[in-house]
Amino acid sequence: MKQKFYITTPIYYVNASPHIGHSYTTIAADTMARFMRGALKKENVLFLTGTDEHGQKIQKAADEAGLSAQEFVDKVVVQFKGLWEKLNISYDDFIRTTQQRHIATVQRALQLLYDKKEIYSAKYEGWYCTPCEIFWTQTQLSDSLCPDCKRPLEKIREVNYFFKISAYQSWLIDYIKNNPRFIQPASRQEEVLSFLHINTLSDLCISRPTQRLSWGIPVPFSKEHVTYVWFDALINYISAVGGFDAKGDYVSGWWGDDTQIVHMIGKDILRQHAVYWPIILKALGIRMPDTICAHGWWLIDAAKMSKSVGNVVNPLEMVDKYGIDVYRYFLLKDVPFGLDGNFSEEAIVRRFNSDLANDLGNLLYRTLTMVEKYYQGAVPSPRNEIYDERITRIVACLAGLHRQIEDALTATTFNFSLALEKIWEPVSMANKYVEDAKPWNLAKEGKKEELEAFIRILVDVIRQVGHSLSPFMPQTASQIEAQIGKNKINKGQPLFPRIENTR
Ligand code: MSP
């Protein structure tokens, strides 16, 4: 494990309110950040999120709202920050691409690349999809519609600036092959490699004429152009944590070899992160991030959630209905990270009733009840001289738990659902133990020491599980800690009372 850890989310477009898809990436990154703050020194972890505020999409949304672009982004950014607060997102820094620190770095990066002759101007003639902000060549088209969004394309003819990414294609292929941890999961790495084998990269158009779009970062070497929103956006990962010195070297406390750098994204933006971004960094002489981790999509009835399809689920509604931690738990547990998942309230309720009400909530409640009943709320001392075989197994499971979670999260796989499965193992063992060994019989039979050993191990399970859960379910972890104090318990209401009806 490196000494420092820097994790980022995509910077989200502020053309619309956040939905559960956005919240998923952010919750995943938050969980990793919280876990790493426990594994490393707290100050050696940096968690960055933010908003992508330039470009056509935003300009259009602002026009529709009858506001200036700046007024509009200032309004929507408040919604994102409000949601992150509500979801308990512990970000350390929030970057907005309209901030001066970002604009300055983007302009410097452009100038450096221009001076190195990595950027040149050329006349462009071809097809353009305005909503996607993507150029298409004739050979990529089967009709006059955008291959991505199926909306009509516009024929354009204009002078633009191009970044010579084509020159880096073979370098990139080798880099990806030699660094198997670079793109995660492995299926995504294969996807990128096969894309690079099948296609020849065209140089990337990194400008837009101000005539067509003025809401962007001015290109430093042309008054007539603003920066293409993706070039602008990717730079956020470095503009938030450093800048270029007079010689043009990038300087940052969070981009050295002592830092593990992870970009967490959805699979929809893999190409930009796994192709454009490494090439931008390489051309600027900056080291690569360690990992680009692309997760799958949350679908509603098998369709990707998106504003244009009109099937978005509002995370605030879900949180109000089920609670923050239930929502966090559901997203992290229900789908192995990397795969697509189907979102439904029925699925939340099912998970809630089985894992949270029946397993965890039940164990906590029955343990507290017994500590109250048999020991007037005082936690009994450990009695390891009389451990039976079942207790011994639970103790071994607890002893290995942290390692198992660490492996699931950090051994490149970001496997949140596996980590949670591991946390549930001692919970299930303890519940089964209660059902099989029936502590109330031990009490009736006057087996005082056995009962103490028994109840104490249940308390130990809950304490450790509560602690292990804190990156995933921070509020639940604090509630468990509050209920099961150091020596004396403080029994409250059941944490997860069963939900009988969905609506
Ligand atoms: N602004 C760009 C990102 C620039 S990063 C340098 C962008 N923004 S976005 O608002 O469209 O957010 C895209 C991200 O939101 C996805 O990569 C993913 O992290 C998340 N999701 C959006 N919809 C999603 C689902 N339906 N399911 C899961 N996550 C999805 O692209």
Image (cartoon, rainbow, N blue to C red):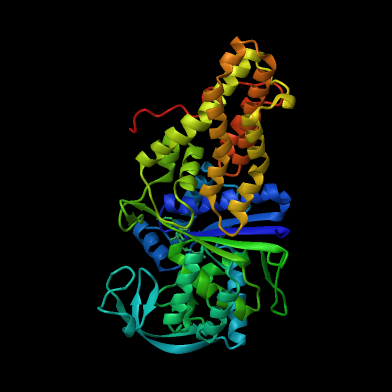
Image position of 329 with respect to 161: above or below = above
155 relative position to 204: left or right = left
The N terminus is located in which quarter? bottom right
Q: Residue at left 65%, top 18%?
A: 451
- Please name whichever residue, 71 or 310, is drawn nearer the observer in this view of the structure: 310
The answer to whether residue 229 shows anywhere in this view is: no
Image position of 419 with respect to 148: above or below = above
- Please name whichever residue, 147 or 239, is drawn nearer the observer in this view of the structure: 147
Image position of 263 with respect to 447: above or below = below
The answer to whether residue 395 shows anywhere in this view is: yes
- Please name whichever residue, 100 or 173, is drawn nearer the observer in this view of the structure: 173
Q: Position of residue 232 (x, y in %)?
A: 53, 70
Which of the 4 image quadrants contains residue 13? bottom left
Image position of 481 with respect to 70: above or below = above
424 relative position to 345: left or right = right
Q: Residue at left 56%, top 74%?
A: 176
Q: Position of residue 152 (x, y in %)?
A: 27, 73
Q: Residue at left 39%, top 36%?
A: 349
